[in-house]
Structure formats: C-alpha cells, structure tokens
Image (cartoon, rainbow, N blue to C red):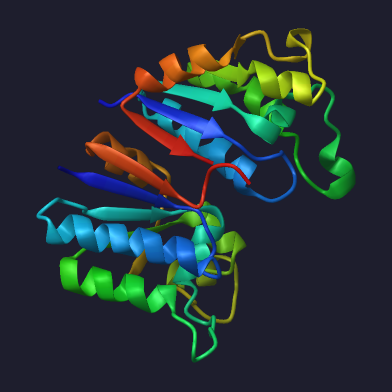
Amino acid sequence: MRYALLVLAPPQATAVHRAAIGLCEAALDAGHALPRVFFSDAGTQVALDTAVPPGDEPSPREHWQALARQHGVELVACIGSAVRHGVLDSDEAARFERPAATLAEGFVLGGLGLLVEATAAADRALTFGGGAP
Amino acid sequence: MKSTLLVMNRAPYAGTLARAGLDAALAYAAFDQPTSVLFAGPAVLQLAPAQEPAAIGRKSLRRLIDSMPLYDLEAVYADAGALARYGLAAADLPAFVTVLDPAAQRELQDRHEHLLSF
C-alpha cells in the first residue's frame, strides 16, 4: 500500500504531529510506501529552523527530520504557506530580501502540485490537523 | 487518477486554513484531477454572499469560490444542516453549488477514493 500525508497543524499541536509521525513509522515498518509528507498552512511552521521549543518538550521538527533521514521520506512545505510563516529557503530569502534562510534541514519548499502528485499516486491519503475546529 | 473530495470545515476568516483548503481544491482541479468540494459546518459561511473582508485586510473567499468553474470545478456541495444553522438559503449560494442532506453526503464520500479535510 502507498500512503500520502497532508499535515496542517502547527508544531505546537504536538499530539497531532506525534500521531502523524507514529502513523508514518508504523506504515513504513509494515512495509508500506510513504514517499512524501506535504505540510501546508500552519503545518509549514514545523520546517522553521529558528523556532526553539522548550527543552523538556518534544520537537516535532526533529522527529520529522529523523523520519526523513531513516526512511528517505520527502518532507515538502507548501511554498505559499511557508513564506507567510517565515519559512524561507535561500532562494526565497533572496527574493524577498530577508536576512537569512530559515528552512530546516531535511525539508524542501514546493508547490501544491507536489501534494496533488503524492495523493494521485497513493492508495491512501490522510489529513492531520484538518477537520472540525 | 484518483477522485478526491476536499471537505472544508472552517469559517472563512478566523485563520488561514479556509483559504489553504480552497487553494488546494483549485490546484487539484488545475491538475485535471477529478475533484469535488464539500462545505460543512462553519465553512458554509465561506459561501455567504456580499462578503466585505477588506475591512479586516483580507480578500473575499466568495470571489475565489465563484472562480471555481473557470477551473472546471463545479462538483461543489454544501451541507443542508449547516446552511440552516448559519442562516443561509440556497439562493445565497453560487449557482453551481448543490445542497446535500446527510445521506447524500455519505454517498458523496463513498464515491471518492481520497478525502482531504481542511
């Protein structure tokens, strides 16, 4: 089975990220394919390298980075949402004349086409952080 | 190709998730995917006519929704119960929006392969 994930919750919603990462690990451990996770809206904040969570709290960013390292999962932050949230790669930092790139290692910026491509190729698509308010 | 139903759940201007959902729906349609959109709960307020969000520095989501047919996106639905709860009538909605009761919404979900929720 091939999975695609869309994550919309900010990293402060640690339970949502924990659930999403847990699902990724379980699916990959069971031999399923999960080539890409797409972050949009507030979810893109998880790719912000300059955010400093309290030392005694889990860091969703570090957990996602570990997942990408261990399993080769591509972590894509929606470029339109990301720049609104201050998540800039070096190209966007130059384009908008900001002092520094802030995109964390292991993440890339990309358009919504990468979400469409991921779900079109997937047997199962799951949203984390959407749904009823 | 997979058929995708995008379910909108958020009021239009509380945050940015409503806009993110609409942008995603337009992207699916622009990439020629079989795409449907269901407005549920407070998200039916995105369909309200005569929105004037410029006063809070935002752009009208209704205008964005009105552009959906330009993307060949006309499989657009609204939850009947939510419309009643938020005081909207069918005549307030864009002409291409179809009002669905709960049974019809279940049927709508069943005939799509993917469901994304905003």
Q: Residue at x 55, y 54 (%)?
A: A41
Q: Residue at x 46, y 60 (%)?
A: A16
User: Picture coordinates of residue A70 (x, y %)?
Assistant: 18, 73
Taking depth in this image into account, of B50 and A7 the one nearest to the observer is A7
Name which quarter of the figure residue A105 lies in: bottom left
Is any part of residue A104 visible from this angle? no
Up the image or down, A129 lies above or below A11; here it is above
Q: Quadrant of the C terminus of chain B?
A: top right
Name which quarter of the figure residue A67 lies in: bottom left
Q: Residue at x 23, y 63 (%)?
A: A25
Q: Residue furthest bottom?
A: A55
Is B24 situated left or right of B62 in this image? left
Q: Residue furthest front?
A: B103
Up the image or down, B16 lies above or below A74; here it is above
User: Picture coordinates of residue A79 (x, y %)?
Assistant: 48, 56
Up the image or down, A24 lies above or below B9; here it is below
